[in-house]
């Protein structure tokens, strides 16, 4: 309460007489208890970036992508991590292939002409290297969660709509490219893996091409590579670079005429990841495309067989992601509590 009696309505409080010329003195009033005043109005404080600060008050990391979809977590991945992770993945894959060839040579295999089994195992090891190296680089700057790579649920409507738009764009533009240059090349990978040698090899290659490859390649390229570059350059430059690199790595097993369409596919899959905020549509569309290519070119199947392969490949690819989605959901619930 105030220590001075309140004045009457419309009348100032009387003050004691003071000598002529002395300054007027107003007795102090003790503050009335009340709520502690809050901070002055202004823009809300921004949270600290994932990388902390360098000691001089400046953030160590700032996300460059201002158009990141809501619900997709920011990461502290640097742009230089993208090419270094890709290089590291191929180094690990090369070392693994060397070990596989050495073991095969012990059992009489000609290292200059590897058997289909050796090629299949080496390709599986390469896909594992794609995933493992991406996780290692992500862990170098903080904890790793599936959501950072885009492994999170997304609304079905926008996901299907954007997937259809991307697929139509890809097949239209790649069809125009094929008509323009009269493409006669072929994908050499299924033949090198021995699809025509045995039923076991055929089934193994089918699973490898239509399920394992989409999972591993999307995890590395759209999950980590594109994410790291996007933090450095924004969406469009990152998507262009990722698309060119994605097409370029297929140069060894695909005729050169097919590389530009693969670069276009890599670019469009980045756009799909960006617009949906999830890696799941990219995995599904990648499996869809690989299943069509395998069923038509490698297996030479009828239309109904190709359709069954497409449905099976997309379903299995997405179901394999289910445990990671559940793991991410459990982590968010624990963080909330």
Image (cartoon, rainbow, N blue to C red):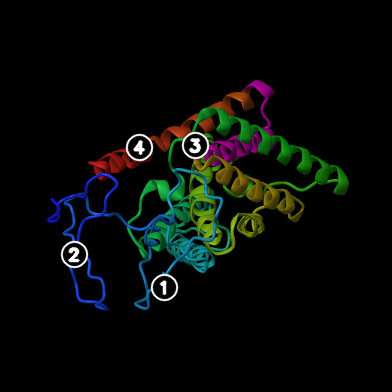
Q: Quadrant of the C terminus?
A: top left
Counting from the top left corner in percent of width and height, residue 217 is at: 53, 50
Q: Which residue is mark 3?
A: 200
Instruction: Give the mark nearer the N terminus: 3 vs 1.
Output: 1
Give the mark nearest the N terminus, 4 or 3.
3
Tell which residue pokes out farthest to the front in this image. Answer: 20
Q: How far apart are the two marked residues, 3 and 2, measured between alpha carbons?
A: 95 Å
Q: Is residue 281 magenta?
A: yes
Q: Is residue 194 visible?
A: no
Residue 52 rendering spot, x and y as whole percentages: 35, 67
C-alpha gap between disc 4 and disc 2: 68 Å
- Residue 304: give x, y in percent of width and height: 64, 21
Label 2 sits on residue: 28
Label of residue 323 in the image: 4
Residue 191 highlighted magenta (yes or no): no
Dividing the picture into quadrants, the one containing residue 164 is: top right
Real-space CA distance between mark 4 and mark 3, rounded to the nearest whole angstrom: 28 Å
Residue closest to the eye, 282 or 44: 44
Q: Earlier in the sequence, mark 3 or mark 2?
A: 2
Say whether residue 36 is left or right of residue 286.
left
* Disc 4 to disc 3: CB gap under 8 Å: no
Tags 3 and 2 touching, CB below 8 Å: no
Q: 196 or 76: nearer the eye?
A: 76
Coordinates of residue 335 in the picture (x, y in percent): 26, 45
- For disc 1, the marked residue is 58
């Amino acid at each position: 309460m105030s220590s001075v009696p309140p004045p009457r309505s419309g009348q100032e409080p009387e003050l004691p007489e003071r000598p002529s010329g002395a300054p007027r003195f107003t007795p102090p009033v003790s503050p009335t208890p009340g709520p502690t005043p809050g901070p002055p109005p202004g823009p809300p404080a921004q949270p600290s970036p994932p990388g902390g600060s360098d000691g001089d008050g400046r953030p160590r990391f700032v996300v460059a992508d201002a158009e990141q979809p809501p619900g997709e977590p920011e990461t502290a991945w640097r742009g230089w991590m993208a090419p270094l992770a890709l290089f590291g993945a191929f180094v690990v894959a090369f070392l693994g292939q060397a070990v596989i060839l050495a073991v095969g040579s012990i059992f009489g295999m000609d290292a200059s002409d590897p058997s289909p089994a050796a090629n299949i195992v080496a390709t599986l090891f390469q896909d594992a290297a794609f995933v493992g190296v991406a996780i290692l680089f992500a862990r170098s700057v903080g904890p790793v969660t599936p959501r950072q790579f885009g492994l999170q649920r997304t609304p079905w409507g926008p996901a299907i709509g954007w997937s259809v738009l991307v697929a139509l764009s890809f097949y239209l533009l790649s069809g125009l490219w094929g008509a323009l240059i009269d493409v006669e090349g072929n994908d050499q990978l299924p033949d090198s893996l021995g699809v025509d040698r045995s039923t076991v090899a055929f089934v193994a290659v089918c699973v490898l091409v239509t399920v394992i490859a989409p999972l591993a390649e999307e995890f590395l390229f759209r999950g980590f590579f594109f994410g790291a570059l996007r933090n450095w350059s924004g969406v469009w430059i990152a998507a262009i670079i990722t698309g060119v690199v994605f097409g370029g790595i297929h140069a060894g097993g695909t005729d050169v005429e097919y590389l530009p369409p693969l670069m276009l596919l890599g670019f469009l899959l980045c756009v799909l990841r960006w617009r949906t905020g999830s890696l799941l549509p990219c995995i599904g569309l990648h499996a869809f495309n690989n299943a069509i290519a395998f069923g038509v070119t490698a297996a030479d199947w009828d239309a109904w067989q190709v359709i069954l392969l497409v449905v099976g490949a997309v379903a299995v690819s997405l179901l394999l992601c289910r445990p990671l989605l559940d793991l991410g959901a459990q982590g968010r619930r624990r963080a909330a509590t």
